[in-house]
Structures are given as C-alpha cells and as structure tokens.
Image (cartoon, rainbow, N blue to C red):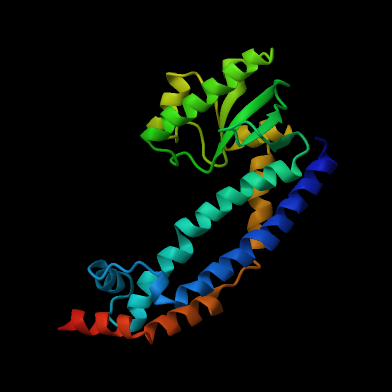
Amino acid sequence: MNAKEQEALLLKAQTWFRETILPKHLVNTAKLTNVKNLDINPFLAPYLAVFMTGELSPESIAKAITYPRVMGSSITTSFGQNMQKFISDVLGNAFGSTTQGIDIEFEDCIDGRKKYCQVKLGPNTINKDDVTTIHNHFKAVRNLGRTNNIAVRQDDMVIGILYGIPNQESNHYKTLNVEHSYPLFIGQNFWHRLTGAEDFYQRLIDAISKVALEANGKQTLDQVVATLAKDEQIIKLSKKAKK
C-alpha cells in the first residue's frame, strides 16, 4: 500500500467513524430516557451518585446511571464490532471469512502469507473459556486445510488485537501465544501487517481523534439526565436514601 492509498484509507476511516460510530452513539444515548430499559441497582445508584457528584438528588442519580452506559461498554462493543466490518469492507487485502470462528482473512504485508485471524478489541478482552474456543476454531481451520490440500501453518492462524502494546496482554492471550503458538498481532504490529505501513496505527488514531472533535453529545446527554431526574422511580430512590 503506497502513501496515496494510505491517505485514502485514513480518509475512509474518518468517514466511517463520522457516519457509523457517532450517530449510533447519539441514538443509543437518547434511548436511556426510558427507566424500564435500564437495570438500576438500588443499592449502588445512590452511593455512586454521591461519590461522583458530592450530592444525593434525582439529577445526581440520573448521572450515575447514564454516564457509565454512555461512556462504557456499549460504545466499546459497538466500536469493536464495527471496526471489524470496516477492516473487511475497506482494506483491499483483508476480507470477512466464511470459515467458522475466523473473523477476517488477509495477506500479511510483512511475510506475504495468508492469515486466518480472530479480531479482538483490546489486550484484556477474552476470558479463560475463550482460550479453548479460539484454539478449537484454529484446529478446525488446519483440519479443513488438510482436507482441501491447503497448507495452513500454525503461525498462519493469528489473533489480531486492535489496540495495545506487547506485554500488555492478559494471561489468557499469553496462553494462546505460548502454549499453543498462535501469534499475537497487537496494536501497531497488527495494523502494520494489514497495511504495510509501520506508522499506520498512530496515524489511524490521529485521524479518528480529529473526527472525535466534531462529536458533541452534551445536549443529548443533558436531556437524558433531565428526563430521568423527573422519573418517579428515580425521585423515590433519592428520597428513600435520604431517610
């Protein structure tokens, strides 16, 4: 991938983030106005409200309920799922896989070999059970390769981690790497192998950060908090805690 193609890809990444991530984040934030859709912990909500704001009120409880959802797992999960689709849709040498348990297949820009890749968001995003699941998926790939007379080496089956640095990964990832010899492509190394550009990882972060400056969800978030603060359940929770 030459410099011109890299610049075009970065522009596509900005467009993808602007048109896919930002609108969904706003929509999902606006949905939080319905208390029935929220799993509110009545033991912790008042405590977290005071811990975060220094006061106990319907408004502070509403903030304690909404802020973690807006800033936490929902946007993280959405980003990871959509980034995987972005890779397969935009990168010319990578495409979604039809092989069970494999997220993408791509031509490694460093060693030139085809890689069968499970894409993970970050260096701490799998649990103990995932180790066995990933290992079994990769074994199935090798077995299928033998059946179809396709040479699939152990190091052709890889885990691509979208962000992070080496030695930051959890012990579960290390088990896959050390005990089962599956390569971990983490952060810069992953994007280098996908694009051929050693600095693409940082340039991608910078490109998306520029689009992030366009995001202003404050008005939507303020409206959600104001609506929740008027909800009878939130008001009762605030009053009960004060007794």
- Could you tell me which quadrant the C terminus lies in? bottom left
Q: Nearer the viewer, residue 131 or 19?
A: 131
Which of the 4 quarters of the picture holds residue 99? top right
Circle count: 0
Residue 176 x/y as whole percent: 45, 25
* Viewer-nearest residue: 149 or 192: 149
What residue is at 31 percent from the left and 81 percent from the top?
A: 233
In this image, 128 relative to 148: left or right? left
Report the side of 35 relative to 214 (left or right): left
> Residue 69 appears in which quarter of the rendering?
bottom left
On the image, the x and y values in percent for residue 97 come to 66, 34
Q: Nearer the viewer, residue 45 or 130?
A: 130
Seen at 43% across and 27% down, the residue is: 174
Choose top left, top right, bottom left or bottom right for residue 201. Answer: top right
Give left or right: position of 71 versus 199: left
**209 versus 153 height, above or below:** below
Q: Residue furthest right?
A: 4
Q: Is 228 positioned to the left or the right of 121 in the image?
A: left
* Residue 197 seen by the camera: no
**Residue 53's x, y, as percent?**
33, 75
Q: Position of residue 149 (x, y in %)?
A: 69, 12
Above or below for 39 versus 137: below
